[in-house]
Amino acid sequence: MTRLNVIKPAAPSSKVAAEKPAAPAAQSGAKVFWRSLEEKADAQRNAEAAHGSDVVNRTIDASELSRLKRRHFMTLSGAIGALATLEGCIRRPVEKILPYTDAPSAGDMTIGLPSHYATVTSQRGEALGLLVNSYEGRPTKIEGNPDHPTSAGSTDLWAQATVLDLYDHERARTPSKKGVAKSYADADAALDAVIAEALTNGGQGLRVLSHPTLSPTFIRLREQAKKRFPQARFHTYAPVSDANVYAGTRIAFGQPLAVVPAFQSAKVILSLDSDFLLTETGSVLAARQFGDSRHMESAAGEMSRLYVVEPSMSLTGANADHRLRLEGRAIGAYLKALAAELAGQGAEIGVSAGGGEVAGVPASWIKSVAKDLLANRGASLVVVGSRQPAAVHALAAAVNRGLGNAGKTVTYVRPLDGADVDPFEDIKALAADLASGSVKTLIVLGGNPAYDAPADAGFAAALAKVPTSIAVTDRVDETASLATWHIPLAHELETWGDAQSRSGSYAVQQPLIAPLFNARAAIEILGKLAGETDTSSYALVRTTVSGLGGSDELAWQRLVQRGSGPVSGFETLGGLSVANDAVTQAIGALPGPSAAGELEAVFLADNKLFDGRYANNSWLQELPDQVTRICWDNAALIAPSTAKQLGIENGDMIKVTVGSTSIEIVAWKQPGQAPSTVGLPLGWGRTKGGTTAAGAGFDVYPLRTSSAPHYAPAKIEKLGKKYPLSQTQEHDSMEGRPLAIDATLDEYKSQPDFGQWATPDMSVAPLWKPQDYSEGHQWGMVIDLNSCTGCGACIVACNAENNIPTVGKEQVARGREMHWLRIDRYYAGDEAEPEVALQPVACQHCEEAPCENVCPVNATAHSPEGLNDIAYNRCIGTRYCMNNCPYKVRRFNFLNFNLEVPETRKMQFNPQVSVRFRGVIEKCSYCVQRIQNAKIGARREERPLKDGDVVTACQQACSARAIVFGDINDKTSAVSKARAVDRNYALLSDVGTRPRTRYLGKIRNPNPEMKG
Amino acid sequence: MQLFPRELNYLPLAVAVGIGGIVGPVATLGIWYYFSPKNTQVGYAPEQPIPYSHKLHADELGIDCRYCHSNVERSQEAQIPATQTCMGCHAVVKKDSDQLAALRGSWASGNPVPWVRVHKLPDHAFFDHSAHLAAGVGCVSCHGRVDQMEVVRQDQPLSMGFCLDCHRDPAPHLRPKSELTNMTWKPEGPSGDESAQAHELAAAGVNPPEHCTGCHR
């Protein structure tokens, strides 16, 4: 018996491949996956690609950069060789050890061991509890806080990336007045003068602008300041917010409420332009709940079904079982038709919705979806995206009530802030007052309105007219450069603060480090306005907690240690009555579908930069967009059919006109885009965001107006110019073999091990004596493709944990991105409405690793625990291993990407991982530093290592819990159980590499009535 | 006409012999030097800013190693003690000594004492003190008789070969947990190296890594 049979759990044995029986129902090899439109169209090119390089169709010509001639190269390399010899002689410079004079107590810090502190981030409308790793006072890695309800131990990609923002050396270091650096004494004097004047006139002419906040301290101080200055006005504005949700619930329930879905209890989910898995509020919790609802231990299990109706392919749309592309304006009409059908089928909707046909919507999308929703009363869910008008949210509330979902799959909570204003009207009113001269002083507490306010508000021009404007932002950005004063805003990891989540927990934001650049917290500025005597952020938060009933010192310390606690009196509302007449009236005023021949511009919260606030974060810039796979740029997304009509190809510059304003932007053909729409991701084209943000992407805010901030009628026109885009979707090709394997639920039930049918195991033993893996720890990973949403948090977490450099747009175009973990995105079927498959791929840690056999210096070798090791200092850079890897997961340091790293950035480096030099290969190590430290920790405590002691960075970050890691020799471990799930398969198993990483095949759950 | 003289035919041979005669010895000498204690710096004993004597403190006064290197069982870093640790005694003992002026200066100013590093591993070697102590490796195995050193010097090569010698056969270097800091402990048994006691300790699950990522990450 060969060892192969040990691993292979069940039938289709290795004979299958030889005998070629009739293909089983679920043989997914039959499905043709394609990664890009070019690949789909151009079979010839594919054939060439199969014989040539792994990177085809580069959009940047790499040769243009190589000006180095051969002779210069020889001269230089000679000189370098001589220098290297010299350097070898001077081996040991005298090195100093500088210990503490007065050491912190061992409980606070142990040199060489990380400490973990609980804190919270509140960046996208929801609080997210964090645990931050800190080495000797330097925060290096952010993880989720298992005790915080919205995190439960995981994070999103933005939380993972925020530690890099902390060390951004381009943040402002001192206050400044009109560009001239000033001291804090000067800035405080200016602020005191503003306050002194406001005290004389009750705040006449004083305005304060901030983002909607989650901080009870911020709200407490703002109320205090309002009382102190009754004439002053406080505005809230954020370019992407839940204002429409609040307005919709006000129509339906008479009070503005936040909608909190419970996806784990839903069997049928209808998402109407809601990207709840990524860009909507509360996406971390949503992704986990959605993952839970799709979790399948065996074919006997149940899973949810997701319908998505949306104009532009979102990550949620990519995960849909059924997806309908529909322009944004028609979605209200679709929900009306659906509500009418539901009422017709017997649901008590209570709202007379009218109904009728909607152009572009097949009848089955109304009849069958209604039937499916009704069949799952109380276990269905309709969610609506924050872009949709208030009336659609109101109608969705009525539909959810009618389906008996309220209180079961959806609950409502009172939002903390921003519920009573339309942010676009508010900022427009503020800008009008600024322009008219009635405002003497404007204080901007965070945010960047000069960049992201609607174009018709004319905020930037109006700001310049205010006599005194104080911008409190992290850098001299678009807003701060127009203000008279700039005060640096501290990062969340630098100051005290607090945040209340929609699940009713109060979390304390605990600083990990003193402000690097002497910056201030927004609450410290507000505390001055509120007349607080002690305006340190600690005192302000402590006072809030005392007010909430936590004056007891021990209770406070426990709260800070755990990171969060429940909010007393917090209400979750379920069975609210819906004001049917108000909803009927509101939906009557919904706009119809757009006229024929007219395009609709859809303004999208960007998958990586969100509204632009993360623009200077190189991890996020380099992360390939989850859907388009473009790095370092955004693009206008247009349907392939529309592009064909207008003769537009990928990379063509186009002019997009909304009203009388137009911008130039590069076009990208996005499969699944509604034909009459153009998707415009916000947040790019920053002019004063920093050097990383500079030149990346195109600013689409100029097209956004307060009257049409989400969907606007637009025209596009081809310009006849090209723009180079770097995108990774065709890098690292595995040459058309079956990789992301999927099946429908019915196919799964009839053939539970469908994954292994598509990739049968090798039937021959290796030529050499196989290593014995039966003893000790044997590490393995399982990735459940059914839970994975493809959000990319794992990639950013891997960047942070493993000191992975970013290489920039040009190098990405040459295929030199360094990500150890990538997410492959495949399309299948029709390019107008494709199925999407997403698959994270890192080093598979093959037991018979092809890379090891070709290394001439034994720099990559196998550990007895089944890891594919690399010793960087042995590597001489032949790249044989990279070429011989069938999974294309090895990365080569073509340049010394870590050479010119700013000092502050170095503080983020994980001291447990080598920072690699030019000329060496690197790849996923299964976070071997975490394995070793867990083993050492267990030995120190004189106990055996237990399951769960080793958590890899990607696993830790994954909110959908798609990644399981552990010891496969321990038969009770989570990873052993996951490997035993029937739909497991090994990637390219037929190559005979025997990978340690296994995948669980994706299951699609289509509605049988809607087939075909 | 013959342009080149006949003797020139011997040129390739002469070149080959010449190269052999030069390259061979140079390579031999190079490798010899590379592996010699001079290169691995055994015996490196730099002058320290304060003439601290381990012989006085550890041997004559009998202070345990862990009194100052207090992290050694908890962390990868054994830790050079803070000025505070020294001042614990020297605020009272020898408080006017000239030799301790730098120490008092550090305590008064808050600036650290700039000790010179003696034992240095390359940055890509991730050594962990706590792991070795937990396994039962004593201080003396790598650091030598520090208790007999007036000036601390490097006692062992601390090269990869030195590490691997022990990782491949740890038994002779293991001792009971109670004897970790004992500089003079000898295994009981007929011949020290092959004591039953050490093998008993090794059998208790000491399984040091010999693969790359055991030390290089």
Image (tube, rainbow, N blue to C red):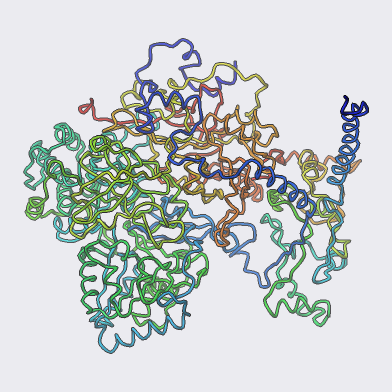
Locate the N terminus of chain A by quadrant. Answer: top right
Side of A199 relative to B145 (left or right): left
Residue nearer the viewer, B10 or A985: B10
Asked whether residue A349 appears in the rendered view, the answer is yes
Residue nearer the viewer, B201 or A989: A989
Task: Answer above or below: position of A388 versus A186.
Answer: above
* Residue depicted at x 33% and y 23%: A747
Task: Answer above or below: position of A254 versus A933.
Answer: below
Q: Position of residue A786 (x, y in %)?
A: 38, 35
* Residue depicted at x 46% and y 14%: A16
Asked whether residue A379 appears in the rendered view, the answer is no
Q: Position of residue A406 (x, y in %)?
A: 20, 49
Q: Which residue reaches farthest right?
A: B7
Tally of numbered discs = 0
Task: Answer above or below: position of A75 versus A182.
Answer: above
Residue nearer the viewer, A324 or A505: A324
* Residue A426 quadrant: bottom left
Q: Which residue reaches farthest front?
A: B1
* Residue A645 quadrant: top left
Task: Answer above or below: position of A110 versus A823.
Answer: below
Q: Position of residue A289 (x, y in %)?
A: 34, 44
Q: Position of residue A894 (x, y in %)?
A: 58, 43
* Residue depicted at x 38% and y 43%: A626
Locate the C terminus of chain A by quadrant. Answer: top left
